[in-house]
Amino acid sequence: MPVKIAGEGEASRPAADRLLAGDPVQRAWNAYSDGSEQFHVGHWSSTRGVWRVRYTECELCVLTAGRVELVSEAGTRVSFGPGDAFVVPAGFSGTWAVIEDCTKIYAIFIPQP
């Protein structure tokens, strides 16, 4: 059965030890999780800020508004805007910067060890 994403979402902020700039407020609306809890789909938004990330999951992102920039620990810098789709692979470490308040649709797969 199809699931519609609705409501206000769950608000959060990056952990203080990961925050590098700003005071971003994030909201997540998880619309679907499979029975194994390995696959999740939903909608996410954030106000401006920069924080460290370390991905243990694989994530497909489709940016629907705003601008973001990801910088790997090796210094590779990639920017995305509305309509861009991209994958952040498990094992990625670096920073996530919200340049303009953004929203994205996500699909996350969490590999089993």
Image (cartoon, rainbow, N blue to C red):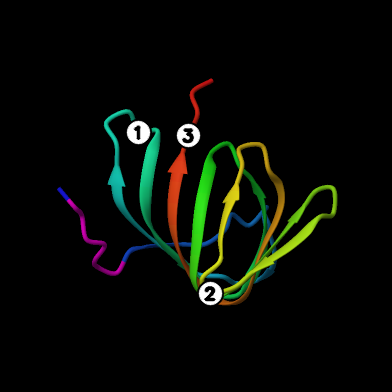
Please provide the residue range marked out in magenta: 2-8
| Image label count | 3
Determine whether label 2 and label 3 are within 8 Å by CB. no
Indicate the position of residue 62 as horizontal and vertical percent values.
Answer: 49, 62
Query: Any magenta on residue 7?
Result: yes
In depth, the one of 89 and 27 nearer the eye is 89
> Residue tagged by mark 2?
82
Mark pair 2, 3: CA separation: 25 Å
Look at label 2 and name its amino acid.
Pro
> Residue tagged by mark 1?
37
Q: Residues within 10 Å of mark 1 (few under 14, many from 20)?
A: few
Residue located 69% across and 67% down the image: 79
> Residue tagged by mark 3?
110
Q: Residues within 10 Å of mark 3 (few under 14, many from 20)?
A: some
**33 in relation to 30, above or below:** above
Mark pair 2, 1: CA separation: 29 Å
Indicate the position of residue 10 as horizontal and vertical percent values.
Answer: 35, 61
Indicate the position of residue 83 as horizontal and vertical percent values.
Answer: 51, 71
In depth, the one of 1 and 90 nearer the eye is 1
Looking at marks 2 and 3 on the same chain, the residue that comes earlier in the sequence is marked by 2
Look at label 3 and name its amino acid.
Ile
Indicate the position of residue 111 as horizontal and vertical percent values.
Answer: 50, 29
Element marked by disc 1 = loop
Main structural element of the magenta stretch: helix, strand or loop?
A: loop
Element marked by disc 2 = loop
| In this picture, residue 34 sits left or right of residue 66 | left
Determine whether label 1 and label 3 are within 8 Å by CB. yes
Residue located 35% across and 33% down the image: 37
